[in-house]
Image (spheres, rainbow, N blue to C red):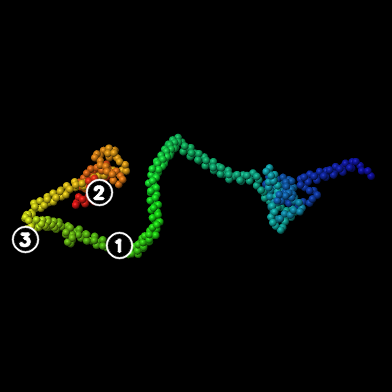
Amino acid sequence: MKIRKEIKIGFLIVVASALLFWGLNFLKGDNIFGVNRTFFALYDNVEGLNVSSAVTINGLKVGKVKSIKFDPENIGKITVEFSLEKDILIPDSSIAEIYSLDLMGTKGIQIKFINSKTYYSIGATIKSSAEQGLKEQVSKQVLPLKIKAEELMGSMDSVLTIVQYIFNKTNRSNIDKSFASIQEIFKNLKNTSITLDTLMKSEKNRLHNILANVESITLNLKTNNEQITNVLNNFSNISDSLAKSKILSTINNANNAIETVNHILQKIQRGEGTMGMLINNDSLYNNLNKSTADLDKLLIDLRENPKRYLHYSLFDFGKTIVVDESGLQKEKEKAAKKNKKNNDSSYNGVNYKIQIKSSTEPIDNNSKEFKGLKNIVEYYNSERYKYSVGVALSMKEAQKLQDSLRVLFPDAFVVAFNGDKQISISEAKNILHN
């Protein structure tokens, strides 16, 4: 039996259409020959999600979105129907989340498994959620930076306002003057450092000696550490003894004694008792003064006229001198002449001068350092040149001369000489009094 040509062509068309239908569905992810499990999910927003969008588990595609439509029972909600391969079981706590498949905004659904021993049945509505889009995520990340940038701009604006105020015309002038002053300060510091360097070089030996002395002192302290410790222990013992002593009672006794003395002094001041009468009554003083004068006359008369009071034929004590008021005056004049004679002996090499300067190098007599004084005497003593002026034969005259010279030379002081040799003040006094 021969098949007609039309039948063959029709059969080929049917087979080709079936293959085309199967191919298109296969490309869409549908397997018309396989058995799929259908589930639903409710969303508030499905922006970017389309029919045939992929459904994945841990990145593996296991199904696709079959339809997207408004839910008639929940106003504003969108129902998404999607199918999974028949061997995929979904635990009943899992979540169907809409997420971004790429940077272009293509969306899909990923099933987030939650460990559970029970599973969703076919046609069940799965819990849903939606991942934030790239725009929302970027906005969320950039928002803090935006806020900080706005705060920074505000701070910069305030800073620029302050800087503009600081660097106005008047302040710029002041700043220029300040920099000029700073430059002058650095210049002075440079000069000071040069001077200090010169000083350190010139005084190098003295500094070395000072450091050597300090080292010697520290060595002595180290050597005598035990003795110093003993001294400190002794002070500690003394302080302990003082702490244990009855200082309070001693102070109280002293206060009582002071009060007693104060009471006695008040009585004396009021003229009570013998001491009070002695201090406050002039008659007793006058009587004692008169008695002393009479006793002085008696002693002079006894010395000059001993035979008035002692009579021995074997001895002659000299002539008789009448002592009265005029005689006492003569004795005083005699004593004054004797003192003048002693004072005249001060010319015998002993004198006082006023030292006004001292130097390691000699100074010319016409130098301005002497402030116009003449008759400057130079002498060398104790490795120094010393300069004095004036001559006094008594310490009293020397002190007067010293006081007058201290107007020009505040450090002037009295020095003593025996001839050309400088001696101490005490030696000069001993020579003059002997």
Question: Residue 61, image x and y in percent?
Answer: 73, 49
> Which residue, given by chain and number where applicable, does mark 3 sit on?
314
Comparing marks 1 and 2, which lies closer to the viewer? 2
Q: Classify 405 as above or below 292.
A: above
Relative image position of residue 251 (x, y in whole percent): 30, 62
- For numbered disc 2, what is the local secondary structure? strand
Q: Earlier in the sequence, mark 3 or mark 2?
A: 3
The amino acid on which the numbered mark 3 sits, given as a three-letter code, is Leu
Q: Is residue 142 above or below residue 321?
A: above
Q: Percent position (x, y) of residue 214?
A: 39, 51
Q: Nearer the viewer, residue 6 or 16?
A: 16
Crowd band around label 2 with a 10 angstrom C-alpha radius: few (<14), some (14–19), many (20+): some
Q: Amino acid at mark 2?
A: Ile
Q: CA distance from mark 3 to mark 1?
A: 69 Å
Closer to the N terminus: mark 3 or mark 1?
A: 1
| Residue 6 vertical position relative to residue 42 in the rendered view, above or below | above
| Residue matched to label 2 | 423
Nearest the viewer among 4 and 319 is: 319
- Residue at horizontal 66 percent and vertical 45 percent from the top: 133
The reply to whether the C-beta atoms of the residues labelled 1 and 2 are less than 8 Å apart is: no
Provide the secondary structure element on which disc 3 rests.
loop
| Amino acid type assigned to the residue bearing label 1 in the image | Ile
Q: Position of residue 372 (x, y in %)?
A: 26, 38
Q: Secondary structure at mark 1?
A: helix
For residue 297, what is the image quadrant?
bottom left
**Contact (CB < 8 A) between labels 3 and 2?**
no
